[in-house]
Amino acid sequence: MSLTDLPLELLTRLCEHLEPQEWGALRISCRQIYDKTLEAYTTRYFKRITLLLTYEGLERLEHVAASETIRGSVEEIWIIPNLFDHWANLDKASFTKVDFRIYLLKLGRHPTPEEHNEVQAELEALFAVYKATMAEHHAILEPPGLLGRLEKCLPRLENAVTLGLRSYETISLLNITRNADLTCLGLRELKSHFSFKNLPMFRQSVSYMPYSLVFSQLLNAIIKSSRKVQALHTCSHSFCGMKLEPFQLPESQYQSLLPLLKDLTTLHMCIRLKDHEQENFDEDTFKRLLNIMVTAAPILKILNFAQWSPIEELSPLYFKDVSRRIQFTQLQELHLHSIEVTVDSLEKFLRTAAPTLKRLSLRLVSLVDRITSASDLGPLTQDSRSWVTSMSTEVKNEMQGLWKRVFEFWADRLNPQYVELSILGYRGRSITLHDNLYMERGQRDAEPFSGVNPSSFYFDAEKANIPFNEWVTQLQIEMVHLPSFGGPYGTYVGGPRLPGTSEIQLHDLGQNLSRQVPAQLKVPVG
């Protein structure tokens, strides 16, 4: 029996075991196979496309948009703002520095001078390609580099209703092999020059600037093409944050954008205010971004929201204003991340979502209510080893009582199917939860403490033997000292930083953890 005689379903299943290039070659070998597998091929590889910001990536996007065969299949466009991730600005000396310990392991001996010279020559040639690629990337980041291409392509990609940014490490992309369904435009050329084996084996700080530059151009392209979108993402679930400083959203553009978001059902809004004290805080732009969420709230079904400043505590007045104005009617999933909030404003934020909310997660959420049993503690700016011992019993009880109020409100108002609580605290001071009913909460194989973070807890109503309100009200809250640990980016005190813990991250592994950290800007609370 020939391939053309096979039932469509079986032929499609066979083709799914081929790499994209192999499937493409098979399709052009026979008109019948081409026609039979057209829908399956374009749906699998072009329903969701990811774009690398290189000239080759943009050219591939134009080819997709120009193809009558493919463009109707495109429903999602994801843009990777960073190229080469943590090592995007290496100089020649850093790039061509070889760690010969790797060669010792591979060769079982010291490399010869000739091998040393060959490797250095290869790295210098690779560095030249790297610099040219980065020059392309930086040119595209600056308007109208990306905007011009999106303006041209979006009108043709009429079914692309999900638009956004995502984090994807270049080294992971280069390591993708067979049967990968990820269609990444521009990756083929990048792979022809680089591999995960020939790149520098060290990291630098992540650059958050590209997220704002790219998202600004994306919004402009939405406006200019009059594209109505159903899902909009400032970043992926890594919550890396869209830096506020370079973002531009004038009032005229903002007013043109809002009508195009009337069908928005999914929003991922992650705002990173500033990384350095000298950066300006554009409050007008910040409020316009928050207003996008408020405007879309009545039809939103999924919301991921983060607003934070890595260097200082953010005034909770911003969240209070949003919670006062927001009105949900269909929200099913809510994920709050890196939020500083009072108990009352959190309750207001959740009140209209309560009737429809099925999934709720809180991660790196810090309460900032004033406490009355002692003077204002302020944001955390010192070594965590004194967190517990420096607080009186009255202060600890009041902090714990704030979270108890939150849980009691949830018990009265919410009936979720799934809840995740991870890394909660008070003004940067971590709490841990004691769950005496962890065997009944729907995860029988789970320990009450998991990994390095003893504040991660999950409730799954489909598997639980108790109702949600019984589970959440029995949680016991304790202020604790979490140990410091080392990671690829430095040493952290108490695990991942809560909002308001300004400069707790210590980048030098051997640095004294008890060093004094400069006092940060005070903001009004309550």
Image (cartoon, rainbow, N blue to C red):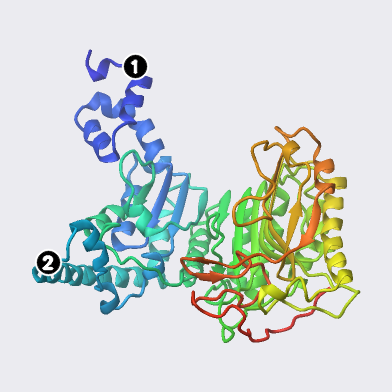
Q: Nearer the viewer, residue 5 or 479?
A: 479
Q: Is residue 32 above or below residue 382?
A: above
Please give left or right for residue 519 compared with residue 14 in the image. Answer: right
Residue neighbourhood size for the residue with mark 1, other residues' Cα within 10 Å, grouped as few (<14), some (14–19), many (≥20)? few
Q: Position of residue 210 (x, y in %)?
A: 46, 69
- The Cα–Cα distance between marks 1 and 2, rounded to whole angstroms, is 55 Å
Q: Most extreme residue toward the left, as rendered?
A: 114
- State the SS at label 1: loop
Report the disc number at residue 7.
1
Q: Position of residue 423 (x, y in %)?
A: 67, 59
Question: Which of label 1 and label 2 is nearer to you?
Answer: 2
Q: Quadrant of residue 518?
A: bottom right
Write the residue at 51% across / 64% down.
215
- State the SS at label 2: helix
Write the residue at 74% across / 83% down.
522
Q: Quadrant of residue 365?
A: bottom right
Q: Most extreme residue toward the top, as rendered?
A: 1
Q: Position of residue 402 (x, y in %)?
A: 84, 62
Write the residue at 39% across / 45% down.
182
Residue neighbourhood size for the residue with mark 2, other residues' Cα within 10 Å, grouped as few (<14), some (14–19), many (≥20)? few
Q: Nearer the viewer, residue 476 or 202?
A: 476
Asked if residue 144 shows in the view, the reply is: no
Tag 1 near tag 2, CB within 8 Å = no
Q: Which residue is mark 2?
A: 115
